[in-house]
Image (cartoon, rainbow, N blue to C red):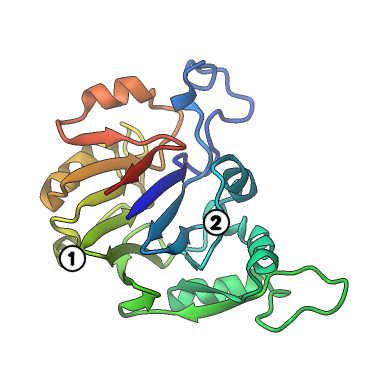
Amino acid sequence: MKIVFLGTGTSVGVPVIGCECRVCRSPDPHNRRLRSSLYVVADGTHIVIDTSLDFREQALTFRVPRVDAVLVTHAHADHIFGLDDVRRYNTIQGTVIPVYASPGTVADLRRIFTYVSADRPEPGVFRPRLDFIEVREPFAVGPVRVEPLPIVHGRVETYGFRLDAGGRTLGYVPDCKQMTDAVVDRFRGVDVMILDGLRHRSHPTHHTLEEAAALLTRIGARHAYLTHICHDLDHDEAQQSLPAGMSVSYDGLTLEW
């Protein structure tokens, strides 16, 4: 399994428009964060989790060659508003691309992207060809088993995902405030766990760095990474504050196992 962190920032990205804080002015490339998204390659299958507002830039920068499926965690703008750019992969691949999400998220996607169709487009009309699929239970994307797991993230219906392929396991939860014991059990002991860790100060719908570290300790993944990070956190300082075995992710970070 191979993953690429296409983006690791919160909804406004880093640097933030109009901000002159030291992190936004930092020359450290680890402090430049596009909106959160993950690219997964497993047994020849290419999956994108969340098409952020920056998806076009991410696909070009990190050379995403194909997209066999899209998983959507929830319908906030920073996680879905790059969906239109998936249409380029329809052209490259000549296929309709499935988009998997919760029933509530699918309803929002259909409302927002009213022009999307799984049918062939009219001549001269360039639009995504997507098949929106509601999921509640585990499903397969080629050889990859995907388990959607409900996460508490404010009022919006939100999933985290566990992916299993070829004996390798991955957990991805970029937006989270609470996780039930049952969901913790489903992530327990995965090879790689990626979790929301916004900042040190409390937030009503996101984990603080300290809350994330405590939850990651409970999950006990072999390798743990924080994502969805805001400009309150300098990369190196945040890394130094974490327990051993936990890392702050950054755009372009690539893992293969």
User: Which part of the image, by quadrant, shows the N terminus?
Assistant: bottom left
Q: Is residue 224 above or below residue 89?
A: above
Q: Which mark is residue 208?
A: none
Mark 1 or 2, nearer chain start? 2
Q: Nearer the viewer, residue 61 or 17?
A: 61
- Residue type at mark 1 is Arg
Q: Is residue 69 above or below residue 240?
A: below
Circle 2 SS class: loop
Question: Is residue 205 visible to us here?
Answer: no
| Residue that protrudes farthest toward the bottom in the picture | 119
Circle 1 SS class: helix
Residue beneath the point at 56% across and 60% down: 66
Question: Is residue 23 visible to us here?
Answer: yes
Residue 110: x and y in percent read 61, 76
Mark 2 surroundings within 10 Å by alpha-carbon count, few (fewer than 14), some (14 through 19), many (20 or more):
many
Residue 77: x and y in percent read 57, 55
State left or right for residue 207 relative to residue 133: left
- Residue type at mark 2 is Thr
Residue beneath the point at 63% across and 62% down: 86
Q: Which mark is residue 51?
A: 2
Residue beneath the point at 40% across and 75% down: 142
Residue at numbered disc 1: 186
Residue beneath the point at 69% across and 61% down: 88
Residue 218: x and y in percent read 11, 50
State left or right for residue 144 relative to residue 192: right
User: CA–CA distance between discs 1 and 2?
Assistant: 25 Å
Residue 50: x and y in percent read 49, 58
